[in-house]
Image: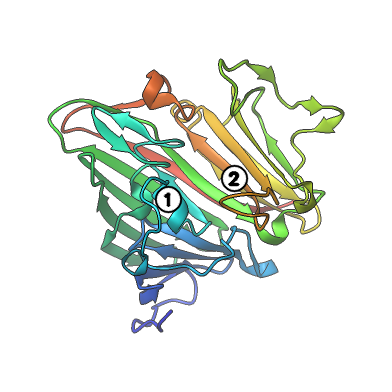
């Protein structure tokens, strides 16, 4: 990363621009409590979300060296490109999540289009009460414009993302939309657990899906408890029926939780994925991560026509997501 040429105006909420990360344009937002690194050139991917009082970055990092799209030579052309470029962290899934699916004849790959698209910087705001970054990007195979504002308030350990998606096409379209914060590192240990108000869940790979009661036990194990890396397995659940749109991963060891807040009416599912040292491709035992992913539907939504958000031709929809640290 190169040094910023811009000197922030405040010691509280501030924005650092003029940075590059692996050849991509990047921006840092920070205040007294948190530091957020945003890869503007690569889908507004967030590779770092640090809680300053504990000097703790809670996001998972891919163990391999990261490469720019332009420097990568594919060795196979029938695989999911997302996995070739996955860096961990927090990214957005739009207009698809999960396996490749069709949207009105456009083949949309694994976890959608946005994660690999460049965004432009529209505005930077910085004052004693607040700092913010507004960016705009466009999907490639579908006619969508996404404008996102990332903001921090003074002495507040919360990153707010206000987003507007506009359908530039001349026909109504339906999308599967979600956020994908992937947690890892020291936040995950044998005492960590998921805390939320969901009362039901579905198994990720079950067809047809069967609604089950959450929180749940499996052979005496509390499913809300995270696994250690030695488990050498992975698991995937769709949690739903939320009393409020919040979910947090709690670490008693660090006395800290990461919390994701979302509109549970529009995003009624939380995809809870955990990889605890699973063997085989693409991780080969090197991953220890847990993802808390608010989504509009399940991963088969585009194929089956449920859990989708309608965006009329020429119209926009808006959504807000907040990631925060909570001391417990």
- Is residue 35 shown above or below 307? below
Residue 296 drawn above or below residue 39: above
Kindly identify the residue that appears in the image at 70 percent across and 51 percent down.
277
Q: Is residue 317 visible?
A: no
Q: Position of residue 314 (x, y in %)?
A: 16, 33
Residue at image point 72% right, 48% down:
250
Q: Which residue is mark 2?
A: 291
- Judging depth in this view, the residue of 233 and 89 nearest the camera is 233
Q: What's the colour scheme? A: rainbow
Q: Is residue 209 above or below residue 268?
A: above
- Dot 2 crowding, Cα within 10 Å, few <14, some 14–19, many 20+: many
Left or right position of 124 against 80: left
Say which mark, if any, is on residue 204: none
| Marks 1 and 2 close (CB-CB < 8 Å) | no
Q: Nearer the viewer, residue 284 or 173?
A: 284
Residue 326 in view: yes
Residue at image coords 44%, 38%:
178
């Amino acid at each position: 990363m190169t040094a910023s040429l811009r000197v922030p105006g405040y010691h509280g909420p501030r924005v650092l621009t003029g940075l590059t990360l692996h050849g991509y344009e990047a921006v840092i937002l920070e205040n007294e409590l948190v530091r957020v690194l945003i890869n503007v050139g690569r889908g507004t991917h967030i590779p770092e979300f640090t809680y300053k009082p504990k000097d703790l970055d809670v996001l998972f990092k891919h163990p391999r060296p990261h490469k720019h799209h332009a420097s990568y030579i594919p060795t196979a052309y029938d695989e999911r490109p997302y996995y070739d470029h996955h860096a961990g962290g927090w990214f957005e899934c739009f207009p698809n999540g999960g396996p490749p699916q069709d949207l009105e004849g456009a083949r949309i790959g694994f976890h959608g289009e946005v994660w690999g698209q460049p965004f432009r910087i529209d505005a930077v705001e910085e004052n004693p009460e607040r700092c913010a970054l507004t960016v705009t990007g466009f999907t490639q195979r579908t006619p969508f414009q996404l404008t996102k504002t990332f903001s921090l308030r003074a002495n507040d350990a919360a990153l707010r993302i206000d987003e507007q998606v506009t359908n530039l096409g001349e026909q109504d379209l339906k999308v599967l939309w979600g956020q994908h914060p992937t947690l890892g590192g020291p936040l995950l240990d044998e005492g960590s657990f998921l805390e939320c108000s969901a009362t039901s869940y579905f198994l990720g790979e079950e067809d047809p899906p069967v609604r089950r009661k959450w929180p749940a036990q499996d052979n005496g194990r509390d499913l809300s408890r995270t696994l250690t890396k030695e488990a050498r397995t992975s698991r995937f659940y769709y949690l739903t029926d939320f009393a409020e749109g919040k979910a947090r991963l709690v670490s008693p060891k660090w006395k800290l939780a990461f919390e994701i807040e979302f509109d549970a009416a529009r995003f009624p599912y939380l995809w809870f994925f955990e990889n605890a040292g699973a063997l085989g491709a693409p991780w080969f035992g090197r991953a220890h991560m847990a993802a808390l992913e608010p989504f509009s539907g399940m991963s088969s939504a585009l194929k089956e026509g449920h859990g989708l958000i309608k965006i009329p031709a020429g119209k926009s929809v808006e959504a807000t997501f907040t990631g925060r640290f909570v001391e417990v």
